[in-house]
Amino acid sequence: MKTPDIQAAPLSAEEIQAIKVFYSAWKEQQPDLLDTVCASDWQDIPMAPGQADGPQGLKDIIRSFVSSFPDIEIVIHEIMGVHERAAVRAAITFTHNKAVLGIPPTNQKVSVPLHEFHYLKDGKLTHTWHMEDWFGLLVQSGAWTAEGL
């Protein structure tokens, strides 16, 4: 029996650009950029406690982080995928000069790995599933050590 030849279309230039703009909202300190690249009913999965639905919820989070960590940015390492489906390997970087998630400040530059999966339709993000390695921040800050195991 012959295996069917299945090929998926690559991500379009418009889709790649939407993803780049999505992450640039942090460094550019322009949360409203999300309105240009996210569907109005975009879903952030999982949502933070108390987070509003849609792009507004993430815009509020960006504003909060930017006010605490003005040098925050998301550095994209890779964008992989096919038309309407993308995976992003990135890192959230900032100077840890204020407490975050109960972790006292270290005044050191930290990097929190980030892995996200996006659905897109008509060049806009419709869903984002994300996972940040906040445990890594515990290790980088010294709040979690080998003695704590």
Image (tube, grey):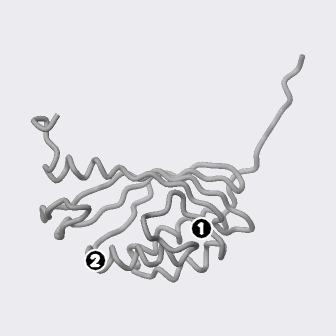
Residue furthest toward the right? 1
Q: Is residue 92 left or right of residue 96?
A: right
Q: Residues within 10 Å of mark 1 (few under 14, many from 20)?
A: some
Label 1 sits on what residue type? Gln
The image quarter containing residue 147 is top left
Label 1 residue SS: helix
What residue is at 13 percent from the left and 49 percent from the top? 142
Question: Which residue is tagged 2?
Answer: 70
Q: Residues within 10 Å of mark 2 (few under 14, many from 20)?
A: some
Give the number of the disc on residue 48. none
Q: Nearer the viewer, residue 21 or 45?
A: 45
Q: Nearer the viewer, residue 57 or 106?
A: 57
Q: Is residue 57 left or right of residue 105?
A: right
Q: Position of residue 78 (x, y in %)?
A: 49, 51
Give the number of the disc on residue 17. 1
Mark 1 or 2, closer to the camera: 2
Q: Position of residue 143 (x, y in %)?
A: 15, 50
Label 2 sits on what residue type? Pro
Q: Say which label, 1 or 2, has the lower sequence index.
A: 1
Q: Is residue 4 left or right of residue 135?
A: right
Q: Quadrant of the N terminus?
A: top right
What residue is at 51 percent from the left and 74 percent from the top? 52
Label 2 residue SS: loop
Q: Is residue 110 left or right of residue 82?
A: left
Q: Nearer the viewer, residue 48 or 94?
A: 48
Q: Are marks 1 and 2 in contact (CB under 8 Å)?
A: no
